Amino acid sequence: MVAPSKVLSPSLASDRSLKQLVNYLSNLYLKNRTRISRTVYITLFIALINRIRSAITEQKAAARRQAELRRTRTGPTPVDTSARKKVEINREFFKNLIRLLRIVIPGWRSKELRLIISHSIFLVIRTLISLYVADLDGKLVSNLVRGKGRDFLSGLVWWMIVAVPATFTNSMLSYHQCQLALQYRTRLTNHIQKKYLSDMTFYALTALDDRIKNADQLIVVDVQKFSNSLAELYSNLAKPVLDMVVYNWSLSRNVGGEGLFAMSLIVQLSANVMRALTPPFGKYVAEEAKLEGEFRFQHSRLIDYSEEVALYSGHEAEKDTLDKGYFTLIKHVNRILRRRFWHGFMEDFTIKYFWGALGLMLCSVPVFIKLPGAGESGMGDRTENFVKNRRMLLSSSDAFGRLMFSYKEITELAGYTSRVSTLLEVIDDVQAGRFDKKLVSSADTAENAAVLRGRGEITEGPDIDFVRVPIVSPNGDVLVRELSFSVKPGDHLLIVGPNGCGKSSLFRILGGLWPVYGGSVRKPPFSDIFYIPQRPYLSRGSLREQILYPDGVKEMRSKGITDADLHRILSIVEIESIVERQGGWDAHQEWTDVLSGGQQQRVAMARLFYHAPKYAILDECTSSVTLEIERVMYDEAKRLGITLMTVSHRRSLWKYHTNILQFDGQGGYIFTKLDAERRLQLEE
Ligand SMILES: Nc1ncnc2c1ncn2[C@@H]1O[C@H](COP(=O)(O)OP(=O)(O)OP(=O)(O)O)[C@@H](O)[C@H]1O
């Protein structure tokens, strides 16, 4: 019999296919002009067309709803130039596919391979059951024709018994296919996220390289589509190939034409019955889209704040949040899968077998109940036609149709393979220090080009010492040709200069985000330097985690710090009241929305006191707080023995520093002591 999903598949429901179907049904009608078939064909014909039309309308409406939902949840999809790349089925595709297959099926003993094997076994079982059902069908019909009521009834009982393993196998196949897609996706997402959140790759990918514009879209959407496509392709290729071999071998034992008509009636009638029993899949899909959107949003957020997270070295904390987002989504998808499994079981059983049995009983009416005008020979002719039609339908629409569609699916898979592979290639390049960025025109000058070709030396030490280090932006703009300065523990450095002269860039080099193109840099280990930006980064998590970031509660406990200590830290910057106001330390909020700009800067200061690092970079981080709070902050930081490097235009801050690095915005700079005389000069 033909699955209802196939009858209603969008491809079949296209105008051309519909025309072919109409022609086909008309031919059948002309060949079978008997009284009963005329009535049955006309009814089924109208029902089928109605059903296809309503399926098209439903699908269009669902697609519109999905698109609407995606727009409201995630905003417009960013344009990715890699998407426009021409994708072909060639050596490159197979090479990339094999590379991805090695990730999603990591070994002979992997769960994925076990799933593929059991999926294949169920495919074989389904074909065998189909053959058996075809055989049984033939016997039933022949008993019907011969008027053997007893044999017909016992055949009918068998039919219902076989229905149990048959429908179970079908449900199992779709369950396996979804499980396989999910497994592939989990493997690939874990693989990519592990790489993406190591070695500051998430920062380098956006800031230092132009090839990937929307890593979030690739990781969240394209990986999923690739996984689905790969899982679908296997069953869509394996099944028709298997069917063709088996059906050729078994010659005339097919199910066929009558199945299509019976199924169209069954689909029509069962649509009403099933509606009452169908779980709210629309709601589930909406929820799934919402969770997808949230997961994607978390990735977008990481891109928005990649610099801050990188300088905080917060990749582990971010990975936790992303993993949590992903597993909430997968939990939901798994729940839907289980519902779909039982719904599919029930749907298959009712539509294909229960209603199939009723259809056969309907055909038996003229045999057991004498209809006026119906002759014995007419019955035999009808049966023969039915059997002939069955064979025709299966051989023409099933195996060949599937194989034809599989080419389209392979092309789609090639598209997703190319996108996911490009992401992995660029990640590998970026991790190996190979960047592809459009350079500014000034990078073409001989002198600047020479700077860009060079490489500097980086060593670890107790202090910060830059010797003749060029400051170069990622697009090759040489901001300062040679910068030399040093900061010893206990020195406090003030950095001033016009906008865009390279003040923050200095910290990007210090934090290891930008490459060192020349000279030598000596710096303490990354864990000894703490960065506070002008726009404080507030993570997704509890209020407590905002103070600890990028530490978690486990690290806090291991450091012997308690909530009372955190409370004391907050009271230094006079925001201890937010604990009560926001609902305690464990309260979860979108903190950037609920805290004011000044409060957010104070939380960042509290974070500095919690970590008490050896060095702190304060990048315009007191712009929204009062002079009094600024004083408290500098006094407390110095009391904790933190060496400070401040970027600020505020004069009030000069008195807290011992040295000054002053850029002129033309590539020149002065590095000197910041004593009373110098302060006077600056004030002039
Ligand atoms: N990811 C990037 N890609 C390309 N250019 C960048 C990038 N980040 C910064 N730049 C450029 O580097 C230059 C120096 O930037 P930087 O942020 O160091 O300026 P700044 O001195 O801190 O300025 P401000 O006082 O406005 O914060 C600017 O011209 C900026 O456009």
Image: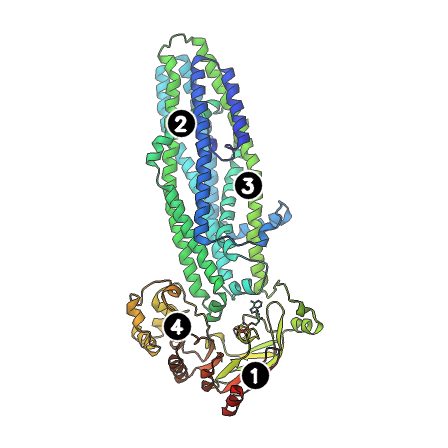
The amino acid sitting under disc 3 is Glu
Give the number of the mark in front: 2 or 4. 4
Q: Quadrant of the N terminus?
A: top left
Q: Which residue is mark 2?
A: 266
Q: Which residue is mark 1?
A: 485
The amino acid sitting under disc 1 is Phe
- Would residue 134 be visible to someone looking at this image? no
Give the structural element (helix, strand or loop) at label 1: strand
- Would residue 630 be visible to someone looking at this image? yes
Measured in 3D between alpha carbons, the distance from the residue under mark 3 to the one under mark 1, in whole angstroms, is: 60 Å
Percent of width and height locating residue 362 = 38, 19
Is the C-beta separation of discs 1 and 2 under 8 Å?
no
Measured in 3D between alpha carbons, the distance from the residue under mark 4 to the one under mark 1, in whole angstroms, is: 32 Å
Crowd around label 3: few <14 · some 14–19 · many ≥20 (10 Å): some
Percent of width and height locating residue 475 = 61, 67
The amino acid sitting under disc 2 is Ile
Measured in 3D between alpha carbons, the distance from the residue under mark 3 to the one under mark 4, in whole angstroms, is: 54 Å
The amino acid sitting under disc 4 is Gly
Give the structural element (helix, strand or loop) at label 3: helix
Pick the residue in front: 276 or 168: 276
Give the structural element (helix, strand or loop) at label 2: helix
Q: Which residue is mark 3?
A: 409
Is the C-beta separation of discs 2 and 3 under 8 Å?
no
